[in-house]
Amino acid sequence: MSELIDNGKEKRQQLKEIILALHAGKDPDVLKREFKHLLEKVGASEVGALEQELIASGELSEQEVKRLCDVHAALFQEGLEKQGRPEEEPGHPVHTFKLENRAIEQVVAEERKIIDRMATAEPEELKELLEKWRQAHSRLMEIEKHYSRKENIVFPYLEQHGISGPSKVMWAVHDDIRALLKQVRQFLASPPAEREEIVAFARKVALPALEAVTSMIFKEENILFPMCLDKFTPAQWQAIYDQSDEIGYTLIEPAQKWRAAGLDVAATQAEGQVAATGKLKVGVGELTLEEITLIFNHLPVDITFVDRDDVVRYFSQGPERIFARTPAIIGRRVQNCHPPDSVHIVEKILDDFKHGRRNKAEFWLPFNGMYVYITYFAVRNEKGEYAGTLEVTQNIKPLQAISGEKRILDEN
């Protein structure tokens, strides 16, 4: 049958039908045998585009694609592994992501080895193995930086190419992995004394977590990164590189400084900047653009502004940001800046603001040793018309400790 598929349109339709058959419950091995010739020639961009089309058309939900994303990868594995891969230069963002993956794989292998030994370990050795496991898992938790760079830098540029479905699915899987890794960390903080309980937890939670991490590496290197290499411009790769240091890296440091070949970096950095000449009237008073920027960046809070169309237009860059923000989110829909599981909350707030049902929404939670207070304000013009949303985030833990009064200036 595959020899009749001569043009791109027919091929895409056939591939969509294969994916729909997979979701309908057809055996992946049967599909592989029936469409072997076709599946061997599928590239990463095609897989991502197909998932995007199926989500956009309503034929499949994001949740359904997420549920079977591992099966998708396995179905197209042979073709993905055969596709040509460009050589990545040391320092290129993809090269760095792959270096991290090799380091992550080493830690995963270390944890697996420790868990295997626990099944027959004597009490004294078991104690030593638990400590080794705790240390290894602490290193694996650094994977947060790897996932955060994908979510906050790579995914926004995919969206600029009209690709958002696969990113949302991958982000949801990130959150599943985070939840499993957190469970392991909490377990290791105060493990039971009985070996049977430890081994049972390892098999039920820890090993599935490690398998999920390994599976994500395959999807990155065989679907996500080839798709990005196919779509992104040199300027976009340069922007990804320039923004990566702010979030940081997992278990490694980039091999070396890197610049995209043939790119006028100075022109790229200057693109879109406004010349700071003269003063701007800002209500009561006048300020230069530089002064406005400095004021926002010296406020003891993080500020993010989303316009009336739900597009992120600005965030302040204070010295101690609470949540990661990179320039890549500018121009991104705010719904795509949040984990899939919390998007419905964001949409409810925005809808309430737009329809005048509320003007403020607030949340507070412990986070990385801080106590974070988050407030969303509806921004309205003089006519009361909705103009956007202002998010203000602050660590209020130091404020909670204040008592009494202070009227004298410190000497230092």
Image (cartoon, rainbow, N blue to C red):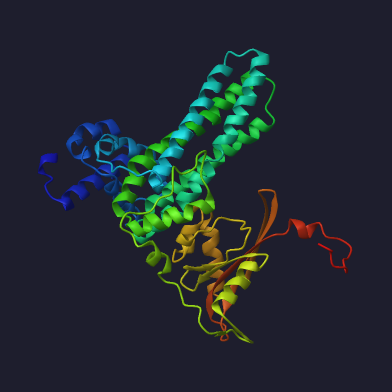
Residue 51 visible, this angle: no
Closest to the observer: 363 or 348? Answer: 363
Residue 348 visible, this angle: yes
- Across and down, in percent, residue 164 comes to 38, 56
Q: Is residue 294 left or right of residue 18?
A: right
Q: Residue at x 53, y 58 (%)?
A: 325
Closest to the observer: 148 or 264? Answer: 264
- Across and down, in percent, residue 145 comes to 52, 46
Q: Is residue 364 left or right of residue 349?
A: right
Closest to the observer: 353 or 187? Answer: 187
Q: Residue at x 30, y 40 (%)?
A: 22
21 versus 373 height, above or below = above
- Across and down, in percent, residue 50 comes to 29, 50
Which of the 4 image quadrants contains residue 315? bottom right
366 versus 361 height, above or below = above
- Across and down, in percent, residue 223 comes to 33, 43
Closest to the observer: 345 or 82? Answer: 82
Q: Residue at x 88, y 68 (%)?
A: 408
